[in-house]
Amino acid sequence: MEQEVERYRKPTRILHWVHAGAFTVLFLTGLVLFIPPLGFLAQDSWTRVIHRIAAVIFIVAPLIYMPLNWKATWRGIKDALSWGMDDIGWLIAAPGYYFLADEEAMPPQEHMNTGQKMWWLMVIVFGLVFVATGLIMWAAKTVAPAELLRWMVLIHDIAFIATGAMFFVHIYLSVIHPLMRPLRVGAWSSMARGKVSVHYAKSHHAKWYDKISKGEET
Ligand code: HEM
Ligand code: HEM
């Protein structure tokens, strides 16, 4: 049995999957509203109702998680905002790493690599954009000026296109890409079971592994 280290605790994993589920439903019901030929699916407005139910879950889940897991929340925000020379190195080495499996040029990474930091930042920024524009469209549809509502739809759509594209990149890089395997002890396992093998931690997050093995971090 390979030695393993903990990467994500249970509350973080629960938040991730609840949020991922809500996002997927928002994405699919949003798509029905976004692509006119799919409009027939929105007849009777059931997709709009489902969009709103998923939006409530999307908003409430982190609001419950954050105060109960303040340390992990703060650490995630701090990590995503901490950039250094190794992040520049990651950006330069990433094409060779992901397309040609050239691991030599890839600098050692912390608990989150640079790509993960960028996804984290996108989720925070566009998450807030979705909530603000979505709630205005929902609550003020009959009272807000038409011009304002048009802007809200446009900004909501830009967030949809940006996060929608990255959503597929996120799934590909965290589950399908050969370098993130094996599934049982690699990236998938970190979010499914909370653990990765020591070998995976060393090869993908060497700086973090160094710190946890010295007891400087969990
Ligand atoms: C998180 C809070 C969110 C709220 C409160 C919200 C709310 C809304 C509302 C009220 C509408 C207008 C629906 C109608 O015409 O009746 C809408 C449309 C839409 N939403 Fe959301 N939404 C949220 C998140 C999301 C997310 C995460 C996505 C996609 C990933 C998304 C994608 C869309 C799309 C594509 C439309 C159609 C806009 C158009 O007509 O071009 N929404 N949303
Ligand atoms: C439904 C499909 C999804 C799958 C299969 C998936 C899978 C994963 C996996 C396996 C990881 C761990 C990666 C690692 O630590 O090496 C992860 C991390 C993460 N996921 Fe997801 N995820 C999905 C959807 C989402 C959505 C919709 C969001 C945002 C709303 C999201 C946000 C994150 C964040 C912030 C992390 C931590 C940083 C990172 O590793 O990128 N995920 N996801």
Image (cartoon, rainbow, N blue to C red):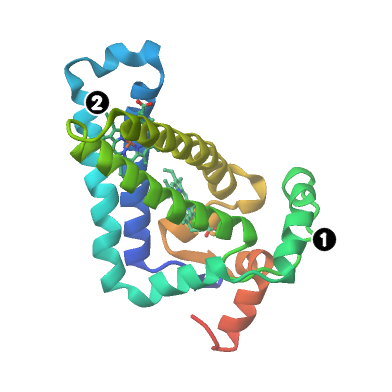
Q: What residue type is labelled 1?
A: Ala
Q: Which of marks 1 and 2 is in front?
A: 2
Please give the residue where the numbered disc 2 appears in the rendered image.
Answer: 47
Q: How crowded is mark 2: few (under 14 residues within 10 Å), some or many (20 or more)?
A: many
Against 23, residue 68 (above or below) is below
Q: Position of residue 19 (x, y in %)?
A: 34, 50
- The image quarter in which residue 199 lies: bottom right
Say if mark 1 contacts mark 2, CB within 8 Å.
Answer: no
Against 40, residue 149 (above or below) is below
Q: Position of residue 104 (x, y in %)?
A: 82, 61
Ligand 1 within 8 Å of disc 2? The answer is no
Pick the residue in front: 5 or 38: 38
Against 127, residue 73 (above or below) is below
Q: Where is residue 216 in the image (x, y as percent from the top left)?
A: 55, 88
Please give the residue where the numbered disc 1 appears in the rendered image.
Answer: 105
Q: Is 93 on the left or on the right of 3, as rendered?
A: right
In the image, ligand 1 is in what quadrant?
Answer: top left
> Can residue 1 be seen at all in this image of the molecule?
no
> Can residue 159 be seen at all in this image of the molecule?
yes
Mark found first going from the N terminus, 1 or 2: 2
Q: Is 64 on the left or on the right of 32, as rendered?
A: left
Pick the residue in front: 88 or 182: 88
Q: Position of residue 117 (x, y in %)?
A: 56, 60
* Quadrant in the picture for the N terminus: bottom right
Q: Residue at x 34, y 75 (%)?
A: 70
Q: Is mark 2 on a helix, strand or loop?
A: helix
Q: Is mark 1 on a helix, strand or loop?
A: loop
Q: Residues within 10 Å of mark 1 (few under 14, many from 20)?
A: few
Pick the residue in front: 198 or 13: 13
Q: Which amino acid does label 2 sit on?
A: Thr
Q: Residue at x 52, y 43 (%)?
A: 171
